[in-house]
Each structure stands twice: as C-alpha cells, then as structure tokens.
Image (cartoon, rainbow, N blue to C red):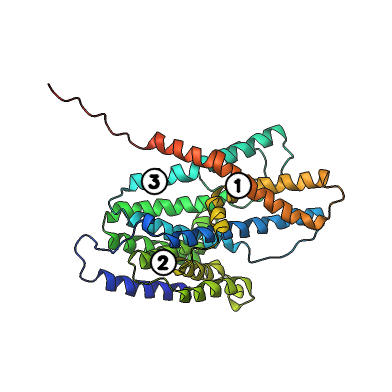
C-alpha cells in the first residue's frame, strides 16, 4: 500500500502541474490511440506475455496428472495483475482521447468487446458438459450458476467453492465488469472534465481497497473488495502520465520494467506481506509503467500473441485439458517432457484460430448490432 500511495502521490503532483491554469474544460495534451504507435505495441507485447504466464500456471495441473510432477511456479498468476494494470491504462487512454464520450457508449463498447467471445466459449463448455459430463475436472452442469456466469454475476462455483464462473478464467471478467461499472459512473459524473473524472475514479478504487483491508468482508462483498482492485487505479495513473505526454520515451524505462519482473520472480519480502496488491500489483505497475515508455515496440511475434491474448486467456483451460487427454491416448513412445511444449503450442494455435474465426467476426457483428445507425438522407425538395 505504501508503494501504491507513493505512485499515486507522484502522479497526482504531476497531474496538478498539468492541470494548473487549465480552462474549465480540460486542456490535456492528449494523444489518440492511433498516435501511440510503438508504445501501444509494447503494451500489446506485455498482454501476450501476461496471457502466456497464466497458461503456464494452469499447465501445472496437466503436468502433475501426467506424472511430470507439480512445479511450483508461484509467480505465474501475476499475469492477471499485469492484465489489470494494463486494463486501467487502456481504459484511461482510450476514453480520455475522446472526452465527449458518454457513459452509455462506454458501456456499449465494453460489452461488445468482452461478452460475445466469453459467451461463445462458455456455451461450448456447457455443450461439452451436456454431451460428456465427466469430460472436465472442474466444471459441472449447474444451470443457476451458468446463468449467473453469463451475466457476469460472481457466484460460488459448485466444485471449487470459490467465486468463479463456469468458465473459471472468467472470474477476472467479473472484476473487469465491476471496474467498467465504476469507470462509466465516473464518466457520467465528470462528463468531459477529465480532471474531475480522475478525481472520482481513482479515490473510489482506493477507498474500495481500504474498505476491504479494514472490514475484510466475506462473500460477494469480499470478492469486490479484493485489494487487487487498486491495480486498476495504478493503470489509470500511468495512463494520465502518458496522455499528458510529460515523460519522453527513453531506454531508462527498462529499469522499472526489469525491476518489476525481478520483484515478481525473485524471493523478496513482498511475498510475506499477505497483500496481492503489494506482492504482485506494485511490481506489475512498474512493469506496465516501463513498457509504456520504452522506445522499442517489442518482438513482432509477441505482438501477435498480444492480439490473440483474450482468446488465449479464455480458451486455454479447454485446450490444455484436451491436450492432456489426447497425449495420454495418442502420444505413445514420445518423451513425456515434450508434453508442456506441445500443450502450449496447441493452446496458442487454438487461440489464433478462435481470434480469426470467432472473436473478430463476433465483435464486428455485435458492434453493428448495437451501434446507432445514421438516419437516411432526406431527398432534396423539388
């Protein structure tokens, strides 16, 4: 918390200097998403890396069952924390570049981006459960739970007993939707005044973190007050610094990027503090902060993986489970040590196919369906 508070104070001072003397409507020196160029591509690389970290984390379940042993790579779940910081950053940059955007259009665009593919993969998983109820280790047909999952309502999972949807990685989408709800409310309350919008959303997120740490509620309130909610605030503050263009890109920003990964991967006192926001959220903030301002966009292959990261994140549990069953039946004399590589490659190929065949067409169709159409031009009077 002290680290996040320091980051908040530093960016707040920077923001006050940028806002001092501004007109009633903000005069941010904003950049559009199209102008961010290599910087956005570097963040896209980071998305691909974060998704791969989550895949490797869940792969440990398959390697354990196949007899390779369970390797305790305890830092891999921090890929989710990197995603949350990126989410806050992207949310601020994409909305601040269009300050007149309404809360309704913000909600509409968010739903059309997130929901279609999530619903499709959840429906596929449900179909598998109907045809072969024992095909998965962690999913069962529980229709009330399935309906809550489709509506992004956190509910106790019938098998894991955690607040997870039928498609387990979707628990992060429940958290994202909560962030969307708060961010949209800040847009509605602050309007085009970016200064007011930031003053609403960042303190609100930090207040939720503080309430969770002090009250420690259970159940649904406990889910929504996890301290990792503060990672969205960190991403917003990085977005403010980036949107004002007050920090030039420099190779010096490799320092926080590398330091963040060191703090995540190496044993440090942060791991003993019992706070995910401190243990992984602060290093994830350093990583995203560095990635935003480094001059190099990153490897093209990792950028592509970033393009497919949403499909990879949602589909990889199904792909890994199928890879495990296929390997057990068909691998024959192949060395078992090849399985992790084969499973990861299969997950990436499946994500690429899903991205091309399902995600892109579904997103386009959803946007065409919900976006208002311009009225036809009236014929000229004779």
The number of callouts visible is 3
Q: Is residue 284 visible?
A: yes
Between tags 3 and 1, which lies in front? 1
Where the C terminus falls, by quadrant? top left
Q: Which residue is mark 1?
A: 351
Label disc, if present, on residue 238 of the rendered structure: 2
Rounded to the nearest whole Å, what is the CA distance between mark 1 and mark 2?
A: 29 Å
Q: Quadrant of residue 379?
A: top left
Looking at the image, residue 105 sits to the left or right of residue 160; the answer is left
Picture residue at 35% right of the left edge, 54% below the top: 95
Q: Residues within 10 Å of mark 1 (few under 14, many from 20)?
A: many
Between tags 3 and 2, which lies in front? 2
Picture residue at 26% right of the left edge, 55% below the top: 192
**Mark before the other along the chain sequence, 1 or 2:** 2
The x and y percentages for residue 118 are 54, 43
Q: Is residue 159 visible?
A: no
Q: Which residue is mark 3?
A: 107
Q: Pointers 1 and 2 in contact (CB under 8 A)? A: no
Q: Residues within 10 Å of mark 3 (few under 14, many from 20)?
A: some
The x and y percentages for residue 94 are 38, 55
Q: Secondary structure at mark 2?
A: helix
Between 355 and 250, the one nearer to me in the picture: 250
Rounded to the nearest whole Å, what is the CA distance between mark 3 and mark 2?
A: 22 Å
Placement of 2 over or under 239, stated as above or below: below
**Mark before the other along the chain sequence, 3 or 1:** 3
């Amino acid at each position: 918390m002290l680290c996040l508070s320091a980051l908040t104070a530093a960016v707040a001072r920077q923001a006050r200097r940028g806002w001092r003397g501004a007109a009633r409507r903000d005069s941010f020196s904003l950049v559009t998403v199209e102008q961010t160029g290599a910087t956005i591509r570097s963040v896209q690389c980071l998305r691909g890396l974060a998704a791969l970290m989550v895949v490797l984390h869940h792969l440990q379940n398959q390697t354990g069952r196949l007899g390779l042993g369970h390797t305790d790579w305890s830092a891999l779940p921090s890929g989710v924390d990197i995603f949350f910081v990126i989410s806050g950053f992207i949310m601020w940059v994409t909305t601040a570049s269009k300050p007149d955007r309404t809360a309704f259009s913000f909600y509409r665009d968010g739903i059309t981006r997130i929901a279609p593919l999530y619903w499709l993969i959840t429906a596929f998983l449900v179909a598998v459960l109907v045809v072969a109820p024992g095909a998965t280790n962690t999913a069962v047909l529980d229709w009330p739970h399935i309906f809550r999952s489709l509506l992004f309502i956190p509910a106790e999972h019938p098998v894991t007993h955690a607040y997870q949807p039928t498609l387990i990685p979707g628990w992060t989408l429940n958290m994202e939707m909560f962030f969307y709800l708060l961010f949209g409310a800040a847009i509605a309350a602050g309007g085009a005044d970016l200064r007011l919008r930031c003053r609403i959303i960042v303190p609100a997120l930090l207040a939720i973190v503080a309430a969770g740490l002090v009250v420690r509620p259970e159940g649904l309130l406990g889910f929504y007050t996890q301290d990792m909610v503060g990672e969205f605030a960190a991403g917003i503050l990085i977005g403010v610094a980036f949107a004002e263009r007050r920090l030039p890109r420099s190779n010096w920003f490799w320092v926080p990027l590398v330091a963040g990964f060191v703090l995540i991967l190496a044993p440090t006192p942060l791991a003993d503090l019992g706070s995910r926001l401190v243990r992984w959220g602060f290093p994830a903030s350093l990583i995203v902060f560095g990635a935003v301002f480094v001059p190099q966009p990153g490897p093209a292959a990792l950028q592509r993986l970033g393009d497919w990261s949403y499909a990879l994140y949602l589909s990889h549990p199904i792909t890994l489970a199928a890879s495990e069953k296929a390997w057990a039946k068909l691998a024959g004399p192949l060395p078992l040590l090849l399985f992790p590589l084969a499973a990861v490659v299969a997950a990436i190929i499946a994500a690429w196919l899903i991205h091309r065949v399902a995600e892109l067409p579904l997103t386009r169709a959803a946007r065409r369906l919900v976006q208002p159409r311009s009225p036809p031009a009236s014929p000229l009077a004779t």
